[in-house]
Image: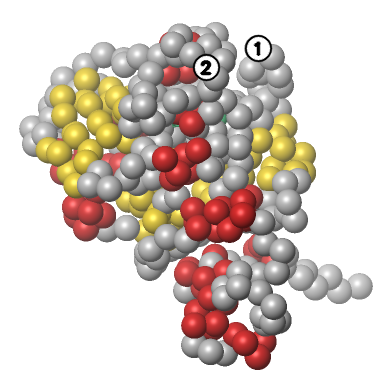
Amino acid sequence: MTLIRIPQAWEISENQITPPRLYYNRRRFIKTLIGAGIGASVLPLAGCQAGTAVGKSASQTALEASLDLPPIDVAQNPKFAKVNRPITTEEIAGQYNNFYEYGGNKKIWLDAQKLPTENWQVEVTGLVKNPRTYDIDDLKQQFPLEERIYRFRCVEAWSMVLPWIGFPMKALIEAVEPTAKAKFVSFTSFYDPEITTGPTFHLGSLPWPYTEGLRIEEMANDLAFFAVGIYGHDLPKQHGAPLRMVTPWKYGFKGAKSIVKIEFMATQPATYWNTLDPNEYKFEANVEPDVPHPRWSQATEKFISTGPGLSWEIKETLPYNGYGEYVASLYA
Ligand SMILES: Nc1nc2c(c(=O)[nH]1)N[C@H]1C(S)=C(S)[C@@H](COP(=O)(O)O)O[C@H]1N2
Ligand SMILES: [Mo]
């Protein structure tokens, strides 16, 4: 008996044969066809408003608008081109978020549209030879951008696979040149109590602004990434526009969103979740399937993939979220 192994769809990185924009954004592609006058013969447009499909809810239209952002055409880094699971659908990832500045549940995508991203600046300061405040456009120009497909594992035991666009954190380290005293780095998210009104419970007792931190060796690791985009375009607000951290071997809460300040320090900085409950949320927060959260096991996860709608498969959680070959030596 011959065994001809037929590859699963997700083993063929379609992204390698189709430009990212067309791969992720069929919606935009269809819009373009309509614009060119081709759509009318293909799509049943009779009886609907131009560009609006029959029966599309206001909420769906708003969701699509929140994801309809300027494309970033970059090459995929072949080292991080594939993981052993399909990429989570953009519309699922874009409406299942954690972003406490805009509410205490997963459905914050609409409230997060209040985030003002115009004229965004990021202050890089502390124990560095070249402190600098970057305009977001300067960051995007100065540091070569690439796409990376990464696993993503939240401490709440759900997971996704996300196609980030950005640059390695170590490129920023090289540009600002930390001094020998710098041992830790603190990252601060945008906070303005008029805008980031947060969850309705416990108001006033939360340690805003949201902060996160890394050891400088963790920040210098190959995997540590700053994202400025996802799914072939700029970052949507719900994912932490215009700049967020991505450390895929750690639980998702380490990935601070909408960063306004990066500070190099001599001592370990306070961080949001660790301040709230150090027993449940460690500073290190590596994905460790053998170490249960005080309230649940971390041995398995609910993998959210391609839908339709929000559905998941139970999968085994891997040590360091599958990235041990890159990071295990940091913790030896
Ligand atoms: N500023 C800020 N960053 C944040 C959070 C937050 O509430 N505020 N939530 C974290 C958590 S718990 C997770 S799981 C991820 C979720 O990222 P996503 O919504 O883009 O998938 O963002 C992280 N970064
Ligand atoms: Mo999370």
Which residue is painted at 26% across and 14% down in the image? 267
Give, as a three-letter code, the residue at label 2: Tyr
Circle 1 crowding by C-alpha within 10 Å: few under 14, some 14–19, many from 20: few
Identify the mark nearer the N-term, 1 or 2. Answer: 2
Is residue 186 shown left or right of residue 233?
left
Give, as a three-letter code, the residue at label 1: Pro
Q: Is residue 134 above or below residue 319?
A: below
Q: Is residue 240 above or below residue 127?
A: below
Residue 291, image x and y in percent? 63, 19
Residue 66 numbered tag: none
Q: Between residue 163 and residue 241, name the one nearer to us.
A: 241
Circle 2 crowding by C-alpha within 10 Å: few under 14, some 14–19, many from 20: many
Which residue is painted at 32% across and 36% down in the image? 259
Where is the C terminus found, in terms of image quarters?
top left
Q: Is residue 240 above or below residue 265?
A: below
Q: Which residue is mark 1?
A: 294
Where is the N terminus found, in terms of image quarters?
bottom right
Residue 143 visible in the snapshot:
no
Q: For residue 265, which quarter of the picture?
A: top left
Residue 130 visible in the snapshot:
yes
Is disc 2 placed on a helix, strand or loop? loop
Q: Which residue is mark 2?
A: 281
Is residue 3 shown left or right of residue 48?
right
Which residue is painted at 35% across and 14% down in the image? 270
Q: Between residue 77 and residue 188, name the one nearer to us.
A: 188
Is disc 1 placed on a helix, strand or loop? loop
